[in-house]
Amino acid sequence: MEQIIAAVIPVVIIGVICAAVLVIASKLMAVKEDERFPKIRECLPGANCGACGFAGCDGYAKALCGQKDTPANLCVPGGKDTALQLSEILGIECKDVEKLTAFVHCSGDCHKTEDKSEYRGLYGCKAAKLVFGGQKTCSFGCMGLGDCASVCPQGAICITEGIARVNPRLCIGCGLCTKACPNHLITLLPEHQAAAVCCNNKEKGAQTRKICAAGCIGCKKCERTCPLGAVKVIDNVAVIDSSLCKDCPDPGICVKGCPVKAITELMF
């Protein structure tokens, strides 16, 4: 019995000493948390989408507390209400938050393009992309396997007739779908933008039309008719500069002028 007690006592003493050292260290080495952090974190929606440019809502909240030049209007999903709350907590001026909505730059559904093969494998766009660029004849277009829909926290994306479609009323502009698409077909468009190009095919017009009845032919008619210079044909496909496409003096001129209807009017 004495031998057992003699063995236990040193262990207990060592445990007490270690516990005391840890307690003292936790006090001396504690990192003080900004008292504003819990309030700021509570204001953020918790989507952890990264649209603000930081690693989730915690990262943005810490930046707001520690970096004086961090704007309070970077949370797109939270919108203006969140920006106002953050500005009040931080005591800074509230700047406008422009709503962003995801848009799929492809209209090559099952009626306008065809499959070049039957894909059998892991169900997903990224997996299919590894097999000869996907199952569709247009390797630049939407594969319709729903990688974007699976990451959307609001259920704003559905697969209709073989391609992804975004419901602008449900989209919060988090940008998760833009990162999920292997063909980079989805972008976030501001509410002031009046039109968008529904094609991503970078092949020459004749080749594009062979594989998709809705493809852009790169004729540059939209580029010539746009009064704002917002439309440019780059790599054989029209691209609209969001920063220039606003307050158009002739709304819809690019939509009406496109001979293949590859440009659509936005109704955000």
Image: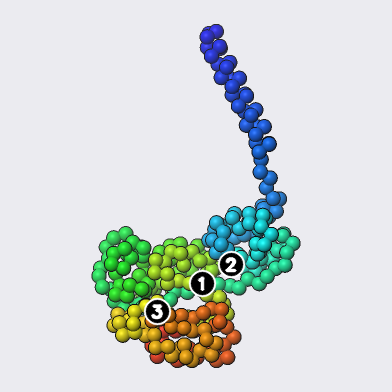
Give the number of the mark in front: 2 or 3: 3
Q: Which residue occupies 65% across, 69% down?
A: 80
Horizontal side of 47 relative to 129 (left or right) equals: right
- Distance from disc 2 to disc 3, alpha carbons, whole Å, reads 31 Å
Q: Amino acid at mark 2?
A: Val
Check disc 3 and report its element: helix, strand or loop. Answer: loop
Label 2 vs 1, first from the N-terminus: 2
* Residue lying furthest front: 235
Q: Residues within 10 Å of mark 2 (few under 14, many from 20)?
A: many
- Distance from disc 2 to disc 1, alpha carbons, whole Å, reads 11 Å
Q: Which residue occupies 50% across, 62% down?
A: 153
Q: Amino acid at mark 3?
A: Asp
- Distance from disc 1 to disc 3, alpha carbons, whole Å, reads 21 Å
Q: Amino acid at mark 1?
A: Leu
Check disc 1 and report its element: helix, strand or loop. Answer: strand
Q: Which residue occupies 64% across, 66% down?
A: 73
Q: Position of residue 186 (x, y in %)?
A: 45, 71
Mark carried by residue 235:
3
Q: Which residue occupies 66% across, 57% down?
A: 67
Q: Position of residue 166 (x, y in %)?
A: 47, 72
Dot 2 and dot 1 residues touching (CB under 8 Å): yes
Q: Quadrant of residue 121?
A: bottom left
Q: Nearer the viewer, residue 178 or 201?
A: 201
Q: What residue does disc 1 label?
A: 188
Horizontal side of 68 relative to 15 (left or right) equals: right
Q: Compared to 135, does 253 lie above or below?
A: below
Mark carried by residue 76:
2
Q: How is the image coloured?
A: rainbow
Q: Position of residue 189 (x, y in %)?
A: 52, 75
Give the number of the mark in front: 1 or 3: 3
Label 2 vs 3, first from the N-terminus: 2
